[in-house]
Image (cartoon, rainbow, N blue to C red):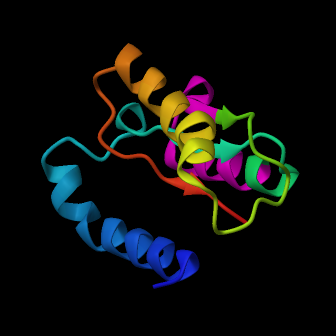
């Protein structure tokens, strides 16, 4: 399954589950970390727009800095660990209220 299809399905699933999550108090801006590719102006723009529309504080936008502006869909494991997984894990270790991590991808 391609990346776009997986991300689209994940977005649809979160949208469909939104009323239930809201009732449980989990669907608030305080529970979301938005992950963007800091080297891609489009990714940053989409992530900032999403955060603004959803009431997500600006300090909960994580800008990944180890990726190029247009990374390929396939990256090897060491690059994934260094550029994506480690920064997200480090952020999540500092904040225990995050329940959702959407990623703005162009």
In-front residue for pair 76/23: 76
Q: How far across and how far down the image is residue 19, in percent?
A: 23, 63
Q: Is residue 43 above or below residue 13?
A: above
Rendered residue at 82%/57% (across/down)? 42
Residue segment shown in magenta = 45-62
In-front residue for pair 75/17: 75
Image-based side of 96 in relation to 94, left or right: left
Rendered residue at 42%/40% (across/down)? 32
Image-based side of 81 in relation to 42, left or right: left
Which of the 4 quarters of the picture holds residue 13?
A: bottom left
Based on the picture, tell me whether residue 53 belongs to the magenta stretch: yes
Q: Is residue 70 above or below residue 94?
A: below
| Quarter placement of the N terminus | bottom left
In-front residue for pair 32/70: 70
Q: How far across and how far down the image is residue 85, in percent?
A: 49, 39
Image-based side of 17 in relation to 41, left or right: left
Q: How far across and how far down the image is residue 84, in percent?
A: 57, 41
Which of the 4 quarters of the picture holds residue 65?
A: top right
In-front residue for pair 72/52: 72
Q: Is residue 8 above or below residue 15?
A: below
Q: How many marks?
A: 0
Rendered residue at 36%/69% (across/down)? 15
Based on the picture, tell me whether residue 95 belongs to the magenta stretch: no
Q: How far across and how far down the image is residue 25, in percent?
A: 19, 41
Rendered residue at 53%/50% (across/down)? 77
| Quarter placement of the C terminus | bottom right
Image-based side of 54 in relation to 24, left or right: right
Residue, far top: 94
Prevalent SS, magenta region: helix
């Amino acid at each position: 399954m391609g990346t776009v299809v997986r991300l689209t399905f994940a977005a649809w699933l979160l949208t469909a589950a939104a009323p239930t999550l809201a009732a449980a108090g989990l669907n608030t801006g305080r529970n979301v970390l938005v992950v963007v590719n800091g080297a891609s102006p489009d990714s940053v723009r989409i992530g900032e727009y999403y955060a603004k529309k959803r009431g997500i504080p600006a300090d909960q936008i994580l800008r990944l800095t180890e990726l190029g502006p247009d990374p390929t869909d396939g990256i090897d494991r060491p690059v994934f660990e260094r550029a994506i997984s480690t920064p997200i894990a480090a952020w999540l270790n500092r904040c225990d209220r995050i329940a959702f991590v959407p990623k703005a991808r162009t």
